[in-house]
Amino acid sequence: MDGVKIREIGPADMDDINKMCVMPGSEPRAVLDVLRESAEAHRKAAAMGAKVFGAFLGGVEPVGRIEIMPIEAAPVPLEGEGLWVIRCLWVLDKARGLGIARSLMQLGLDAAQASKGVAVLTYPGWMPVAFFERFGFQVVERKAGGATVLLRKTVPGAGTRVSLVSPIVPFARPEDAAFSRDVVRVEAVFNSRCPWVMQRYRKYLSIAASISDRVVTHENVIHTHADALRLGEENLYIDGVAPFSGPVRPQELERVVKERLAAKGLG
């Protein structure tokens, strides 16, 4: 890979790779805040064994990354013993075809070689299933909403297992029923390690809040694996229901929220 350098990224250098994960057109102060939030989350994850590897064009411009970690440090709702989890494997379009994803994957697998296996949670348009299958991953679970869980066992044929946890959304509480009749609740569940994800969901909440003063928004941030098991998959929830899978278009969000307001006589 001429002109591409790949190296491990320590917690103190997260901004070096996080530059590729900032939404275009972001307000500078907001960027600083989200980078700081992400760096702190990565510092805590690194203390639990998480590894981040980045690819740089010319040794400077970040164009690819992989994050892999013991399941106890993973901000995803997967259960299993002795596993490592790939939270993110991403290569920018400008750097596709250079073998970066393959090199990053190999580094990740090498880092996890002492584990019982490596798991990954994918979605349509995010970390293609076919790519992982080329490295010996097998699909172990598919969810109607689009989530797919894959597992690569360190020892083929071993009884290693992984499963996706889908808890009852904890913020849909019975005691909130009276309050919820008077408002539409739009809540987001997302992790605190990815600047892009944090910015995206906060933008969704801002759009929802602007629709009506009868819309109440709240963010539920996944900091730990325990948070992920309690909160479930990253998504937007409207009155406790997740109407979307994958990226959300602002006009679709507005439509669904307005329909919910009308259905409750609040429009």
Image (cartoon, grey):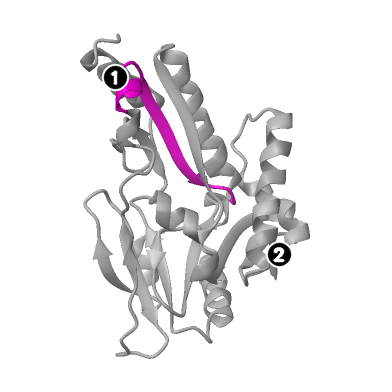
Image: 197 above or below 266: below
Task: Characterize the local packing of mark 2: few (<14), some (14-19) or many (20 or more) Cα atoms within 10 angstroms.
Answer: some
Q: Is residue 179 magenta?
A: yes
Q: Amino acid at mark 1?
A: Arg
Q: Position of residue 231 (x, y in %)?
A: 41, 49
**Highlighted magenta segment, given as a residue range:** 177-193
Residue 181 tag number: 1
Point 39% across, 90% down: residue? 155
In this rendered view, identify the residue nearer to me: 94 or 263. Answer: 263
Quadrant of residue 36 in the image? top right
State the separation of the CA atoms marked 2 and 1.
48 Å
Residue occupied by mark 2: 9
Residue 130 in view in this figure: yes
221 to the left or right of 124: right
Based on the picture, tell me whether residue 185 belongs to the magenta stretch: yes
Task: Return the residue nearer the eye: 242 or 8.
Answer: 242
* Residue occupying the far right of the picture: 12
In the foreground, 192 or 125: 192
* Position above or below: 213 against 133: above
For mark 1, give the secondary structure. Answer: loop
Q: Is residue 60 above or below residue 86?
A: above
Residue occupying image coordinates x 21% and y 16%: 263
Q: Is residue 127 above or below residue 154?
A: above
Task: Compare marks 2 and 1 and give the one earlier in the sequence.
Answer: 2
Check whether the beta carbons of the residues at disc 2 and disc 1 lie within 8 A of each other: no
